[in-house]
Amino acid sequence: MKKILLEDHEIPKQWYNVLADLPSPLEPPLDPETKEPMNPEKLKALFPEALIEQEMSTERWIDIPPEVLDIYSIWRPTPLIRAVKLEEYLDTPAKIFYKFEGISPPGSHKPNTAVAQAYYNAKEGIKRLTTETGAGQWGSSLSFAGQYFGLEIMVYMVKVSYEQKPYRRILMETWGGKVVPSPSPYTNIGKKILEEDPDNPGSLGIAISEAIEDALSREDTHYSLGSVLNHVLLHQTIIGLEAKKQLAKIKHYPDVVIASAGGGSNFGGLALPFLIETFNGDSCTKFIAVEPASCPTLTQGKYEYDYGDVAGLTPLLKMHTLGHDFIPPSIHAGGLRYHGMSPIISKLKEEGFIDAVAVPQTAIFKAAVDFARTEGIVPAPESAHAVKVAIDEALKCRETGEPKVILFNLSGHGLLDLSAYQQYLEGKLKD
Ligand SMILES: *Cc1c(COP(=O)(O)O)cnc(C)c1O
């Protein structure tokens, strides 16, 4: 069987909250002004109460609201596919499975949390959400989600991407989102940066500062983040929970679980539900987070308190970080260019439950093209990081003869990233 599907009614009805099972609790977020543990009351200027509660909850299972399940049902459950053609091409005894999140309308896993965040904000009377986006995957997911709940979505898009990658901007506008290039003249931080350097290309850190400043300046507006935070990882566990059910249908359990990591929600979404057995001591599955060599947060970042943005407006989080003023080179996997990492994923790495590897982008695109020429799907450059390491693991099995079960997340398709493929195919891509 190549494709393992779930019936509509088999979609998980609860998210898995790993905070119930972490071997030691997370260090608390700190107030950016006082450096004392953050008072949750202060977060209410940015987030709805329901999400603040989820951020700190230690309930193991959290119900998915019917309104969210209703929107999920547009594209979920997503298929789990056995990469038979890739296995044959690699001549490996390994069984390679991938969860395909690219069938969502915005084309990635990101709407899993965008829909939930839009729902909880609208329910608490919020009319407008601000956010940042790099290449546009998150901004388009939030624009898509906002329209179902009558929310205006204001997206600060990193200026280089705004200029070089118009298609996701058009996608956001098609779903009713408002998009401005960041740094923008609409916020104090944006104005200040533009005065000093009118040609500043922008960064995620700057765009986050702008989106937060905007949200703090208006009563009817909240801020929404597409990765890193605990509640975002919580919403993404739908991926791993579905994959677990799908593998159970054919009586399989993964030996290796692989996903790319930018802020960590994609990796967490697939991996956390499988870590339950690891915490219980019932499995020795290997977990691998894959990041770009040019933004090696987990493999080379320091594990310490840092801000999530350039201006220092966000709470300080204990996480792996390259420094909040780090501006990564503009590689093609825009969704993985973030200086920080989810505190949950950082802790799991620190305590040895998961591994991380960093891979240069030419090797990533070679794997992406091999995948497209065997399995047919053109992966998003971010997702291709997982493809690359899945291939490496399968090749190790060819050496050892072990028929391991390898599971990875194909977090999105690459049909709006073809200019990167063009550069690769023309031999112009550099590491
Ligand atoms: C954003 C994105 C990622 C990275 O997700 P994080 O939660 O930031 O780690 C991976 N793949 C695709 C397709 C993305 O859009």
Image (tube, rainbow, N blue to C red):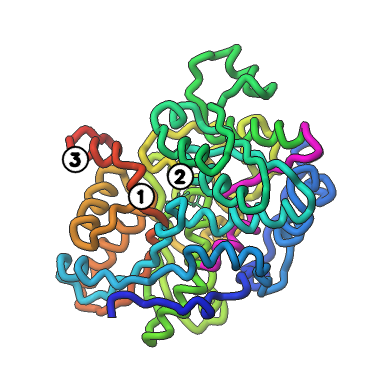
Q: Which residue is mark 3?
A: 425
Mark 2 beta carbon near ligand 1 (under 8 Å):
yes
Q: Which residue is mark 1?
A: 380
Mark 1 beta carbon near ligand 1 (under 8 Å):
yes
Q: Residues within 10 Å of mark 3 (few under 14, many from 20)?
A: few
Q: Where does the image place residue 175, in percent across and percent down from the top left? A: 53, 44
Q: Amino acid at mark 2?
A: Gly
Identify the residue shown where x is 49% and y is 27%. 159
**Which region of the structure is painted magenta?**
217-238
Q: Residues within 10 Å of mark 1 (few under 14, many from 20)?
A: many
- Residue 386, relative to residue 209: is it above or below? below
Whether pointer 1 and pointer 2 mark residues with C-beta atoms closer than 8 Å, the reply is yes
Q: Where does the image place residue 47, in percent across and percent down from the top left? A: 74, 48
Identify the residue shown where x is 50% and y is 40%. 174
Q: Where does the image place residue 11, in percent across and percent down from the top left? A: 53, 75
Q: Amino acid at mark 3?
A: Leu
Q: Which badge, 1 or 3, comes first in the chain's sequence? A: 1
Check if residue 222 falls in the magenta segment.
yes
Identify the residue shown where x is 76% and y is 46%. 126
What is the number of the mark on residue 335?
2
